[in-house]
Image (spheres, grey):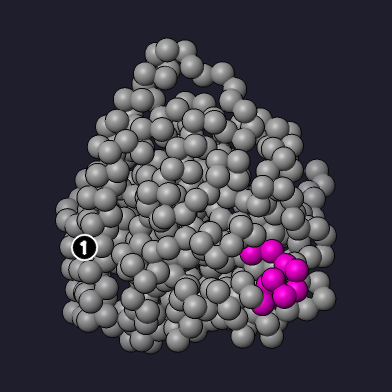
C-alpha cells in the first residue's frame, strides 16, 4: 500500500514511544519495591473536579448527547468569554471563540485555514513537536529557530525579523512553553507582533498552559495585544480534562465562518458531553479547586527545580508556568559514559525506574543535551523519583 508523502513527513511522537517503554518496564517491576515513577507524560495527575464530573453524568442521564453547532455551544462560548473578562480583564466576544475537539483540533483548523503549500512558519527550537507537524500536515514548512537560555528558550523580535523570508507566513509561539515551562517576555512578544504585522503575517500562540502561570509578569494572554492575535487554548491542562478532548480558539471575527466550515466537514463538532460538563469548570466551587491545584503545581516546581540543580541536572531557566523542568543532563551523561539524553532517559528507566522524556522530540537545538521531566505528579511520587535519581547519579 502506498503511503502519502504527507504521512512520511510526520515523525513518531517520541514521548509516546517512551511511554510504551515505560509501561513495559512498569509491568516488569509492578510487584517489586521499586515500581516505575512516571515523570514523562505532560498530564495533570488530578481528574476533573466533582462538579464537572457530576455535570457529565447528568448530561448523559438526560440524554443530551446530540450534535452541537460546529462552533460549539453558545452557552460555552459565552462562558469562556466571561472567563477572559474575570481572569484577565479582557473583552473577548463569544463570536470570536471557536470550541474544538481539543487544542490539537484548534491547531489543525488554524493551519488549514491560514497555511498554504510552501508557506513557512517560524517556531522556537525547542518546542512542542505536534505544533510543527500541524504545519507540515497543512503542506506548510515549519522553520525551527534555535533559542538559548538567555532568550528563555523563546523567539525574539530580532530573530524573527532576521529569519523572515519571501515564503514566511507567520509565527507559531507557545507561552508558557512545552517543554521548558517558560513564557515569552511581554515586551519581546510585543516586538515580535510588530515584526509580524509589518510583513502582513499571522501570529498563532499556544496558550494552553496560561492558566498554570506562576508569575504575574508573564501570566497575561497575548490577546491583550490586538484582535489579530490567534490564541489556542484547552481544557486539558489548567482544567484537568485531558481525555475529554476539548479546546478552543480565539480568532479575528472574519475568520470564524471559515473555521466553522472546516469544522463542519472535519469533525462536525466537539463532544457534546464534554462541552456541557465544561460549563461547570467556571462555577465558583470548581474555580476555587483549580486555584488550589495551581498552588500545588507551584509547590511541586519549587521543590523539584532546586533538587535537580543540586544533583547536576541543571535547569538553566526556572519555569514560570506549566509543569515541566527542562534539564541539562550533559554533565551526567559524561559522568555515566552515556551518549546523549536519549541514552540517559533509557538508563534512568532501567536503573532508577524513573520515566523521563529525552529532548529529541522537541527540536534540534542542543536537544540531545536535555531531558524533560513532568512535575504533574504527587509530591510523594516526586520525592521518590528525586531520591532515586540522586542515588543513581551520586552513589
Q: Does 362 appear above or below 12?
A: below
Image quarter where the C terminus lies is bottom left
Residue 166 position, x and y percent, is 82, 76
Q: Left of 389 or right of it: where is 63?
A: right
Q: Which residue is mark 1?
A: 299
Task: Tell me, yes or no, if residue 99 can be seen here.
Answer: yes
Report the label total.
Answer: 1
Q: Residue at x 42, y 17 (%)?
A: 60
Which percent across, then down, holds residue 250?
Answer: 58, 50
Q: Is residue 128 visible?
A: no
For image coordinates 53% across by 73% down, the residue present is: 189
Q: Which residue is the extreme one toward the top? A: 62
Magenta region, residue range: 195-204
Residue 200 forms part of the magenta stretch: yes
Q: Is residue 380 magenta?
A: no
Front residue of 255/272: it is 255
- SS of the residue under disc 1: helix
- Image quarter where the N terminus lies is top right
Question: In the rendered view, would you say 331 is above or below 323?
Answer: below
Out of 234 and 324, give the one closest to the viewer.
234
Amino acid at each position: 500500500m502506498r503511503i502519502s508523502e504527507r504521512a512520511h513527513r510526520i515523525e513518531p511522537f517520541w514521548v509516546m514511544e517512551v511511554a510504551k517503554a515505560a509501561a513495559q518496564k512498569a509491568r516488569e517491576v509492578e510487584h517489586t519495591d521499586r515500581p516505575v515513577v512516571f515523570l514523562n507524560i505532560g498530564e495533570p495527575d488530578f481528574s476533573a473536579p466533582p462538579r464537572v464530573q457530576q455535570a457529565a453524568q447528568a448530561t448523559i442521564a438526560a440524554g443530551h448527547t446530540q450534535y452541537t453547532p460546529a462552533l460549539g455551544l453558545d452557552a460555552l462560548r459565552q462562558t469562556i468569554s466571561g472567563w477572559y473578562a474575570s481572569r484577565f480583564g479582557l473583552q473577548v466576544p463569544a463570536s470570536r471563540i471557536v470550541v474544538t475537539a481539543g487544542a490539537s483540533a484548534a491547531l489543525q483548523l488554524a493551519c488549514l485555514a491560514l497555511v498554504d503549500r510552501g508557506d513557512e512558519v517560524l517556531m522556537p527550537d525547542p518546542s512542542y513537536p505536534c505544533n510543527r507537524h500541524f504545519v507540515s500536515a497543512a503542506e506548510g514548512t515549519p522553520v525551527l529557530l534555535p533559542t538559548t537560555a538567555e532568550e528563555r528558550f523563546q523567539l525574539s523580535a530580532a530573530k524573527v525579523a532576521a529569519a523572515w523570508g519571501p515564503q514566511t507566513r507567520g509565527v507559531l509561539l507557545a507561552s508558557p512553553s512545552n517543554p521548558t515551562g517558560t513564557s515569552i517576555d511581554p515586551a519581546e512578544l510585543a516586538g515580535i507582533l510588530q515584526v509580524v504585522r509589518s510583513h502582513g503575517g499571522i501570529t498563532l500562540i499556544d496558550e494552553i498552559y496560561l492558566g498554570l502561570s506562576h508569575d504575574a509578569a508573564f501570566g497575561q494572554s497575548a490577546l491583550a495585544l490586538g484582535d489579530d492575535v490567534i490564541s489556542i487554548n484547552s481544557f486539558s491542562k489548567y482544567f484537568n480534562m485531558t481525555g475529554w478532548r476539548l479546546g478552543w480558539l480565539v480568532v479575528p471575527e472574519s475568520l470564524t465562518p471559515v473555521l466553522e466550515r472546516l469544522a463542519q466537514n472535519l469533525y462536525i463538532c466537539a463532544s457534546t458531553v464534554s462541552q456541557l460538563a465544561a460549563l461547570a469548570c467556571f462555577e465558583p466551587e470548581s474555580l476555587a479547586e483549580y486555584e488550589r491545584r495551581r498552588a500545588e503545581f507551584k509547590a511541586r516546581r519549587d521543590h523539584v527545580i532546586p533538587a535537580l540543580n543540586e544533583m547536576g541536572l541543571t535547569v538553566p531557566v526556572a519555569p514560570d508556568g506549566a509543569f515541566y523542568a527542562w534539564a541539562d543532563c550533559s554533565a551526567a551523561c559524561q559522568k555515566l559514559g552515556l551518549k546523549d539524553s536519549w541514552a540517559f532517559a533509557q538508563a534512568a528507566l532501567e536503573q532508577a525506574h524513573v520515566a523521563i522524556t529525552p529532548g529529541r522530540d522537541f527540536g534540534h537545538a542542543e536537544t540531545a543535551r536535555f531531558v524533560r521531566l513532568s512535575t504533574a505528579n504527587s509530591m510523594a511520587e516526586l520525592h521518590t523519583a528525586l531520591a532515586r535519581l540522586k542515588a543513581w547519579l551520586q552513589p
